[in-house]
Image (cartoon, helix red, strand yellow):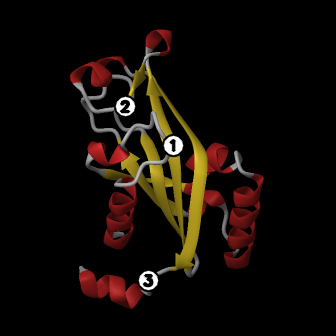
Amino acid sequence: MRTLMAVALTLAVSTIGASAFDTSELGQAGSLFLDDITALIDKSPKLKAEVAAALAKVDKTPDKIICLGMRFPGPWKELGGARVAPYTCEIGDQELEIRARVRLTGRNGKVYEKVTGEAMKRAETVTEDKLVWTWKKAEPQEKKDEKK
């Protein structure tokens, strides 16, 4: 799990596109199930097919796969606890990393690009688009245990 968190934090450093919220500013990762990001995955038919094939290969359903995403901490009035890209999920012996452009908006469509007091009070909606993903071989459990 620590490896996944490190990967999620590393991925968070790079944002995709202009007018994106830099999720690395959130400073913490949180777990969620792959099932929780199905709507995001469904935005790309290619990603959806790849995930379905990976799940079939390991005979698992999305509600059995744990992922990590960046987490909005408690001070975010409307978004506290929500998870956003980048997401990292281990499916069998593969690790899926999903990055996306993250946009925060408040009333009247105001866009927030940075962590500010105003953003924490007034941001109400998170949207994610422009998906980019990579697959790589997951680190063996023995190596993860050695790092603990």
Percent of width and height locating residue 111: 43, 22
Amino acid type of the residue that numbered disc 1 sits on in the rendered structure: Arg
Taking 80 as reference, is 147 above or below it? Answer: below
Would you call the spot at circle 3 few (<14 residues within 10 Å), some (14-19), or many (20 or more)?
some
Give the residue at x 31% y 23%.
119
Q: Which of 59 and 76 is in front in this view?
A: 76
Taking 76 as reference, is 95 above or below it? Answer: below
Q: Nearer the viewer, residue 60 or 117?
A: 117
Q: Is residue 15 found left or right of 52 in the rendered image?
A: left
Q: In which quarter of the image is residue 11?
A: bottom left
Q: Which of marks 2 and 3 is in front?
A: 2
Rendered image: mark on residue 42: none
Which is more N-terminal, label 3 or label 1? 1
What residue occupies the far front of the structure in this picture? 18
Rendered image: mark on residue 139: 3
Give the residue at x 34% y 54%.
13
Percent of width and height locating residue 82: 42, 38
Would you call the spot at circle 1 few (<14 residues within 10 Å), some (14-19), or many (20 or more)?
many
Q: Whole-Å distance between the Cαs marked 2 and 1?
A: 11 Å
Rendered image: mark on residue 113: 2
Q: Whole-Å distance between the Cαs marked 2 and 3?
A: 34 Å
Residue at the disc numbered 1: 101
Q: Is residue 87 found left or right of 133 in the rendered image?
A: left
Q: Is residue 24 found left or right of 94 in the rendered image?
A: left
Amino acid type of the residue that numbered disc 3 sits on in the rendered structure: Glu
Which is more N-terminal, label 3 or label 2? 2
Element type where label 2 sits in the image: loop
Query: Are the residues at dot 2 and dot 3 in contact (C-beta closer than 8 Å)?
Result: no
Q: Nearer the viewer, residue 8 or 144?
A: 8
Percent of width and height locating residue 64: 58, 63
